[in-house]
């Protein structure tokens, strides 16, 4: 039995295999780059926290850094972000302005993402009494997009988002508060003592599964080569005199 894949199928298969393999190699390279990028960002998060005053002086110069702030929570202005998933359970995220201890009365407040609560706890935090004293909060600094001037808007204290994104959701938060906000949000670390709200930092993750893409491209290359082999064997079998075919 002869192997006769034909010139055109061989050329097309070679081009397809080369293309799929090059795409697979590119995804492998992207995987290594992404791992380094994530490691660099997580290393910055693990550095000692900065004073919040240093961050507020240059809010765009400290990506992926933690900071520590001290002040009094203005619980009367707490905003709940509804439909915030945690695993398979839905709840709210508790966002409360922190009036910084070393800032003036007219200084912008620091919005703190205190953490997640189940939906059943929402009303309790909307009517939370004022705290007795100052609190010290350490968390991840996230950029908070704001308008240059605060628009007029009726206070809601509940904002419905499927996913809270401070870089896009800042304006609607600012509209609910009677004073300006700082251009960053502090995502509070988890409290070792537990309880609500359940804080925790959002570690950066890859938006793309490069390994799966690489396996897909290499698999397509293998399938193309296997189809070419099958075609060549089939053509050779048909051309074999013993199979009743004709020789060319």
Image (cartoon, rainbow, N blue to C red):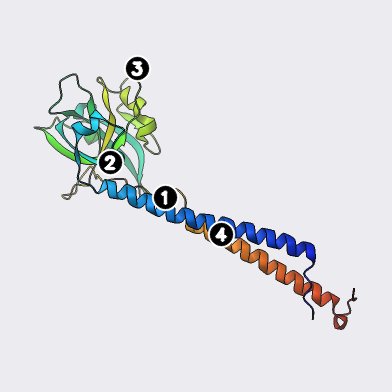
**Mark 3 highlights which residue?**
151
Residue 177 lies in what quarter of the image?
top left
Label 4 vs label 2, nearer the camera: 4
Which tag is nearer the camera, tag 3 or tag 4? 4
Q: Residue at x 39, y 54 (%)?
A: 35
- Dot 3 falls on a residue whose secondary structure is loop
Q: Distance between the residues labelled 4 and 1?
A: 18 Å
Q: Residues within 10 Å of mark 3 (few under 14, many from 20)?
A: few
Q: Disc 4 designates what residue?
A: 216
Label 3, label 1: how many angstroms apart (C-alpha)?
A: 36 Å
Query: Which label lies toward us, 3 or 2?
Result: 3
Ranked by sequence position, the earlier of labels 3 and 4 is 3
Question: In the image, is residue 11 above or below residue 205?
Answer: below
Q: Return the mark for residue 206.
A: 1
How far apart marks 3 and 2 lie (CA) works out to 31 Å
- Tag shown at residue 120: 2
Horizontal side, residue 237 vs residue 194: left or right: right
**Circle 4 SS class:** helix
Q: Distance between the residues labelled 1 and 2?
A: 32 Å
| Marks 1, 2: nearer the viewer | 1
Mark 1 or mark 2, earlier in chain: 2
> First in sequence: mark 4 or mark 1?
1
Q: Residues within 10 Å of mark 2 (few under 14, many from 20)?
A: few
- For marks 4 and 2 on the same chain, the one whose residue lies earlier in the sequence: 2
**Looking at this rendering, what residue extends furthest in the bottom direction?**
242
Instruction: Depth check: give the residue in front, 147 or 86.
Output: 147
């Amino acid at each position: 039995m002869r192997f006769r894949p034909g010139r055109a199928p061989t050329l097309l298969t070679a081009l397809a295999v080369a293309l799929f393999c090059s795409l697979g190699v590119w995804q492998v390279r992207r995987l290594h780059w992404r791992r380094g990028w994530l490691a660099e960002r997580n290393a910055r998060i693990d550095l000692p926290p900065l004073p919040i005053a240093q961050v507020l002086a240059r809010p765009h110069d400290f990506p992926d850094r933690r900071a520590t702030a001290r002040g009094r929570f203005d619980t009367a202005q707490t905003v709940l972000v509804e439909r915030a998933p945690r695993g398979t359970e839905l709840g709210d995220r508790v966002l409360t302005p922190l009036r910084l201890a070393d800032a003036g009365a007219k200084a912008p407040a620091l919005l703190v993402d205190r953490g997640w609560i189940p939906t059943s706890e929402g009303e309790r935090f909307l009517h939370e009494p004022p705290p007795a004293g100052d609190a010290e909060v350490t968390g991840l600094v996230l950029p908070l997009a704001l308008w240059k001037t605060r628009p007029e808007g009726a206070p809601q204290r509940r904002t419905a988002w499927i996913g809270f994104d401070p870089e896009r959701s800042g304006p609607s938060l600012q509209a609910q508060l009677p004073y300006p906000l700082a251009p960053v949000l502090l995502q509070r670390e988890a409290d070792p003592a537990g309880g609500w709200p359940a804080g925790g930092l959002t570690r950066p993750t890859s938006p793309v599964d490069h390994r799966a893409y690489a396996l897909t491209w290499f698999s397509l290359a293998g399938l193309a080569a296997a189809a070419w082999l099958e075609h060549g064997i089939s053509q050779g079998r048909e051309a074999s005199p013993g199979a009743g075919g004709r020789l060319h």
